[in-house]
Amino acid sequence: MTALLRLLCVCTLLLAACGDDDASPTTSGSTTIALPGGLVGLEADTVARGLNNPVFLTAPPGDERLFVLAKDGFIWIVTEDGVVEEPFLDIEALVGSDALEQGLLGMAFHPDYSHNGRFFIYYTNVDGDTRLAEYRVSEDPDRADSGSARVVLSADQPGTAHNGGMLLFGPDGYLYVTLGDGGGAGDEFGNAQDRATLLGSILRIDIDNGDPYAIPADNPFVDDAGAAPEVWVYGLRNPWRIAIDTEAGFMYIADVGQDATEEISVVQWDAAAGMNFGWPVMEGFDCYRAEACDGGAMTLPVLAYPHSEGCSVIGGYVYRGDAIPEMRGHYFYGDWCGGWVRSFRFDGAGAIDERDWTLEFGQIGQVQSFGLGGDGEMYVLTQDGFVLKIVPIR
């Protein structure tokens, strides 16, 4: 979708607001469920405001600090006393442009961060190309060592959009990296079904071995001379955010749509290798290129919704925190244009217990990302600079 079309979608929706292959698909709508247990409702509490275009939030397990990424190249630490004055990391000079879908986009702490101080960031450089870089924390736990930078992976981008940007360590210790199809309408550059390119895929790499990384031996295309061995799954347009629910063993992939549909796929994490998610042959449950449509050979989403409700799905997480036990197992997601937050529970066959939280949260603005604190509690980030925490009302 072009920037102009998305802008028109935003205006239309905001005005309106003011007045696994075997999984059973659903189309999201206004379905609501009774709140469980003693839960009266949820609300979104403001934790921080005034940040410049925040796009992601994360923290090492058990850490009380929140690390918030801004698209312009800064990582800020937020504590109970507010935003720390000096940034944790400043790569503004490396980012170049933070327009549209470019900039500093993702971050992941190494699973053994408390001992080795390693973390990884994903950004587009001054030429608009993808860079995955490793850094280490300095002797000051609130400051990264900017001199420790090491570029781990590079990918040329043919356009300015659909850059993906999610970094996530899996239960296997490998790093998962999302890349979109490179931009343009209808996979203009022909990347999503081309396994020889890194674009339009989720990559799986071993950053603890090799130079600068190793390929896991069980990656699906390691023995395919015509494919990039880093590719784990493919056929994606712009998987801006993904999540792995380690307790239930499912991966959630929120893939931003083209003209008609936004979609969320849920697959068994340890059985997903090699899956084709269909783009641009399919968009949601429907044929996008009718002359080549064969949904039976592809993994279809579990849930989709039309552009009358939003225009850019923002994937979140399955809640596993302690503050709202009634919502454990529910996956939260939002939409950049719609300004809403919704949730559902995946029962292994389909999306159930769907709920729209607009009455509780209100129209919170353009949702850019979700995040998890070190204690597993969930946050929402909006383009106008707010960090919101999802909390219970009893």
Image: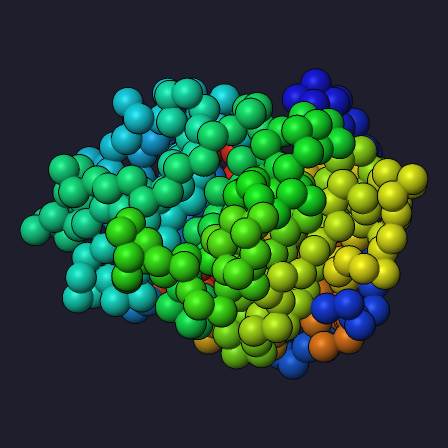
Q: Decide: is 247 above or below 174.
A: below
Identify the image quadrant of residue 200.
top right
At 75% from the left edge and 60% from the top edge, which residue is drawn? Answer: 299
Residue 249 percent across, percent down from the top left: 57, 76
At 29% from the left edge and 49% from the top edge, which residue is drawn? Answer: 212
Residue 192 percent across, percent down from the top left: 66, 42
At 20% from the left edge and 65% from the top edge, which residue is drawn? Answer: 114
Q: Decide: is 149 above or below 168.
A: above
Residue 220 percent across, percent down from the top left: 56, 63
- Could you tell me which quadrant the N terminus lies in? top right
Q: Nearer the viewer, residue 337 or 212?
A: 212
Residue placed furthest toward the right: 291
How many numbered dots are placed on residues in this image? 0
Residue placed furthest toward the left: 139
- On the question of residue 276 being in view, the answer is yes
Q: How is the image coloured?
A: rainbow
Q: Decide: is 86 above or below 321.
A: above
Question: Is 81 left or right of 305, judged from the image as shown?
Answer: left
Question: Is 305 left or right of 169, judged from the image as shown?
Answer: right
- Could you tell me which quadrant the C terminus lies in? bottom right
